[in-house]
Image (tube, coloured by chain):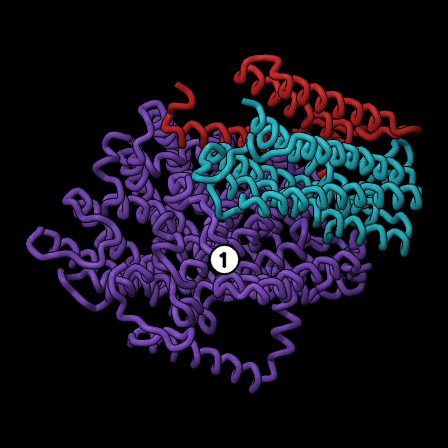
Amino acid sequence: MATVIEHAHGHPAHEGEHYVPLEYKEKDDSLKVFGFWLFLTQDMVLFACLFATFVVLRTHTGNGPDSESLFDVKGFIEETFILLTSSFTGGISTFYMRKKRAIGTVVWLLITAALGAAFVSLEITEFLHYISIGATMQTSAFLSAFFTLVGTHGAHVSVGIIWMLSIVIQILRRGITPALSRKVFIVNLYWHFLDVVWVFIFTVVYMMGVIH
Amino acid sequence: MSNDHDTPQITKTFHQEKFPWQGIFGYILSLVLTAFSLWFGLAHAAQYGVILYVIMGLAIMQIFVQMFMFMHVTETDEGFPWQSLGLVSGLVFVAAIVIMSIWIMTFGAGVS
Amino acid sequence: MPPSHLSHWGLLITGDPLIYGADASIALASIAIVYVLTKYKKWKWLWDEWLTTVDHKKIGIMYLIAAILMLFRAGTDAELMRTQLALPNLHFLGPEHYDQIFTTHGTVMLLFMAMPFIFALMNIAVPLQIGARDVAFPYLNAISFWLFFFAAMLINISFVIGGSPDAGWTSYAPLAGSTFDPGPGENFYLMSLEITGIGSIGTGINFLATILKMRAPGMSLMKMPLFSWSIVATSILILYAFPALTVVLALLLIDRVAGAHFFTITAGGNPMMYINMFWIWGHPEVYILILPAFGVFSEIVSTFSRKTIFGYKSMVFSLLLISLISYFVWAHHFFTMGADASVNSFFAIASMLVGIPTGVKIFNWLFTMFRGRIRMKMPMLWTIAFIPCFTMGGMTGVMLAAAPADYQYHNSYFLIAHFHQVLIGGTLFGMLAAMYYWWPKVFGFLLDERWAKWAFWMFNIGFYVCFEPQYVLGLMGMQRRMYTYPSGLGWTDLNFISTIGAFIMGLGFIFLVWDIIYSIRHGERDLTGDPWDGRTLEWSLPSPAPHYNFAVIPHVTQLDQWWELKQQGRQDELRPKASDIRPIHMPKNSGKPFLFGLAFFVVGVGFVFEWYAVAVIGFLGVGALLLARSFEAHPDYHIPVDEVVHTETALGRL
């Protein structure tokens, strides 16, 4: 940004004494990390609204099935552990990025994306199953809210996968630059955030749905 | 910016690990919390109301696991780590939206 | 829905002379624009200087122009409504047409006039006030503008193509659901607000990051001008409120186009949930609209009284307190839903509490003026007009906040009068005050005071004549959104007076526009950069500021730095010295934000008419642009020292 050179008083803000990760070395990149945090706070409110809608409507099943008869415990446990693991592997890719090790970063990002893809495919299978037994978005308010909340999360994960792959391609071309390390850091922030959202979907939608 | 006298100076927030202990610890913690939630809920270890509070509490703990073990929420290159304040106030608003919506939409019955 | 006198020819609306008039004026305006651009060979200039710009000052100007155009558009709606209501049993507008016009009036005024006006001021003033060279994310800033711009296009074409939305600016379900409101009209509302809402979130993120992370060295938060503080409070509210709008509109859209049951009255849907979530956004939104005006007034009162603001810390604290409390008052918009006493009491008390920090601000402004050497320039006139007007609006607001009494006022003209009094008397007066205040900084000349005074008096007198009778009409039982009324209820005189007031306000608007046109040629040129004897950093720069703003970033030691330096005769300290100038890092212009807006426009059209192939094409465009940006290697450049030195010398600053 406009301020890089002057705001840092003509030299990079951090030289020598303290360890500063690459993604914070340029003012421009550290600003973007901060901006992304702000994006996450608004995304948090967005999911809060979807959760509020779901909680208000979760018993409004109309003539459709309720959550207890619909959810498959084994299915959502699998989804949960896959996503928790992918959050961990994403964290490891940040670790390698901070060591400036391109191959490690790329490999762990690819593992994370692959776990994400496994998660999304499980979720699609789950959705298709519900639709096949006539439990669609049009069936009841509960199902409208269910598909929208869980689907919005799934859409976020899908976008994250494409994003990770685009970063992998960029690292393979350019190596670990300050801009790319910032991108790795940010995509992983996004990924951990989605993991937290999923923990709440797991708790509020699935667990509360099958406990009576 | 960097001469911000009124806000607390937090520097040296970065530390470098030789091995990703923090991540592994976070991962184990998240697995344990999830497993406990599953067991406590599915075994119907308590009354419905108690189960709800316990598994919600466990979910809230997972927020902090992700934030501190993976998201490095307190890191900042200069000045105050504003994102942590943003997240905390965000959580307040999130709670307001969800709890007060339930309160309003159950016409007060959800609380009284 | 009453039988329609409007009909369709394909997608075009036919059967009404007003709409033919709109068709003709849109066609003529488009032809005129293309003709002028082609004749004077200005296409390249338009693209290079404006459509691809990432400069906050130019983006601010584009927001300002759009806001004034939209003020005209929605103001025309208002005049049409007041004409229809001037006398009982008129048939100037049919019922369906009237519904469309009050819907677009409210929607355009709030989302496409007030919001861009505020964004214009944020862009124009904030980076200059805090000593920054641009906002934190200039590229995102351009995206925000083009999302707003194309969303405004989308809602404005609805009038002639496909039909305007007609379920009110709040678009309550189930009325706005597909059962009671088929056709594309309502989709225009949903998609255009969705798109501009995303842009607004971008702006909130951008300015919060800018102010928290990019202040000049030494400018701690408590040495920051109050307008910038008000933008902090506003941005926080945007961040936490706009996602609720995004969600509620998306859910209603899913109901309408995919047959879901969030807000229907069958299959378990709950229309009250729409209202609940709409106001989770809607109430913070009115504070998003008023807080920047509070910031503006603080700057103006201090400058034109030649005194430091009274109670700076309490001003900051009250801003933050208002933004916090405003998040916990939303249910006062639907006291009549019938929630139990605990809910209504909580929200009634919270609503009344907002009056306290607001009162603190009013008194602080008055104390600042007290014993000040007040200069009655245009910004100050609008500020002085604001104080009684907004105070009255605030007091009627406290009346509405009394939940039991609200059962009487709810949805009556009392409410209409109240919110026009706070939104016009607060937000619009504030925006106009700010326009006169920062105009010379942006354009390098002052707006002529004589014509401005005509605009001021017409608008103010018209305002009271128009809206005060409406309080009485409300108490007499007149409900909002009635397209006509029978004679013999005693409403006729007051309605007629109100209509006269609306036309006096219209005259005020004409004078305002004439003042701008007149001043372009005859307005006093601002050669000093400091026409008002200002206090904050933006007045230390030439008018208009060079595109990099500050050749050398200033060091700040106190509040009102520029004023204090002038008092001590040290203003040269803020002039750049050639030896201090370094190459300046700036973002490159880019055509992608414009294309990004266009791609979202395509998405919008796709959903409005439920042409999903078109929506998919739009989304692919959005995705492609995101990836293209990500792969871009060098989105920035450096201005060499020579060029900066050259520019500054030409400005007489070296």
Location of residue C572 in the rendering, given as x and y in whole percent from the top left corner: 67, 50
Provide the secondary structure element on which disc 1 rests. Answer: helix
Image chain in red: B
Image chain in purple: C
Which residue is found at the position 85% from the left and 39% from the top? Answer: A93
Location of residue C650 in the rendering, given as x and y in whole percent from the top left corner: 69, 67
Taking depth in this image into account, of C527 and A82 the one nearest to the observer is A82
Taking depth in this image into account, of C119 and C162 the one nearest to the observer is C162
Q: Is residue A78 above or below residue C255?
A: above
Is residue A68 visible in the rendered image? The answer is yes
Location of residue C360 in the rendering, given as x and y in whole percent from the top left corner: 40, 31
Q: Is residue C20 left or right of residue C149?
A: left
Q: Residue furthest front?
A: A133
Crowd tier of the residue under label 1, counting other residues whose Cα lies within 10 Å: few below 14, some 14–19, many 20 or above:
many
Taking depth in this image into account, of A146 and A169 the one nearest to the observer is A146
Q: Residue furthest bottom?
A: C39
The quadrant of the picture occupied by the C terminus of chain C is bottom right
Marked residue chain, label 1: C
Residue indicated by mark 1: C191
The quadrant of the picture occupied by the N terminus of chain C is bottom left
Image chain in cyan: A
Is residue C311 visible in the rendered image? The answer is no
Q: Residue furthest left?
A: C488
Which residue is found at the position 67% from the left and 21% from the top? Answer: B37
> Residue B62: which quarter of the image?
top right
> Residue C336: which quarter of the image?
top left
Badge 1 amino acid:
Met
Q: Is residue C465 above or below residue B83?
A: below
Which residue is found at the position 38% from the left and 67% from the top? Answer: C163
Q: Is residue C35 left or right of residue C143?
A: left
Q: Is residue C472 left or right of residue C274?
A: left
